[in-house]
Amino acid sequence: MYYYNLVIDLLRSLKPTIFVGTSRKDLQAFPAAVRGEIGQALFEAQLGDHPHNAKPLRGLSGVLEIRDNFDGDTYRAVYTVRFEGVLYVLHAFQKKSTSGIATPQRHIELVRQRLRDAETIHKATKEDRR
């Protein structure tokens, strides 16, 4: 019974996750090993923890980027916990640039747009809960 209550409490503490735009479909296209690593990191974020492979995305407050390397390629998923009680996955992509580790500008712009979309979704669902 104790274990059951522990699991129920854990599930109740999970922040719901909302995938913005094509982020779910993009993430599902990643190799299974990468999906597992990123999925584990998102689960940790849902619990309110800071995943070891998540770093703040420069220039965007409250936005984090999970990085995973697999078979010579780099995969990234970007999420935010900026909005109370909800985790929004904003973008997932395979980094193709060979010029350094910086996130390409086109991806930053897409994250900014989806962050605005997440804000709109959050405001609308918040009003629905009233």
Image (cartoon, rainbow, N blue to C red):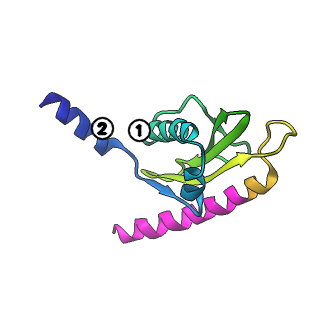
Looking at the picture, does residue 32 appear above or below residue 90? above
- Disc 1 crowd rating (10 Å Cα; few below 14, some 14-19, many 20+) is some
Q: Residue at position x 30%, y 42% from top?
A: 11
Q: Residue lying furthest right in this view?
A: 99
Q: Residue at position x 52%, y 33% from top?
A: 50
Secondary structure mainly formed by the magenta segment = helix
CA separation in Å, label 2 and label 1? 8 Å
Residue at label 2?
10
Q: How many marks?
A: 2
Horizontal and vertical percent position of residue 81: 52, 47
Which one is in front, 124 or 37? 37
For the C terminus, the image quarter is: bottom left
- Left-right relation of 69 to 11: right
Q: Residue lying furthest left in this view?
A: 1
Instruction: Give the quarter of the image for residue 2.
Output: top left
Label whose residue precedes the other's in the sequence (2 or 1): 2
Looking at the picture, does residue 60 appear above or below residue 10? below
Disc 2, disc 1: CB below 8 Å? yes
Q: Amino acid at mark 1?
A: Leu
Horizontal and vertical percent position of residue 32: 54, 41
Horizontal and vertical percent position of residue 101: 79, 36
Q: Amino acid at mark 2?
A: Leu
Horizontal and vertical percent position of residue 30: 60, 47
Residues in magenta? 110-129
Residue at label 1?
47
For the N terminus, the image quarter is: top left
- Left-right relation of 72 to 61: right
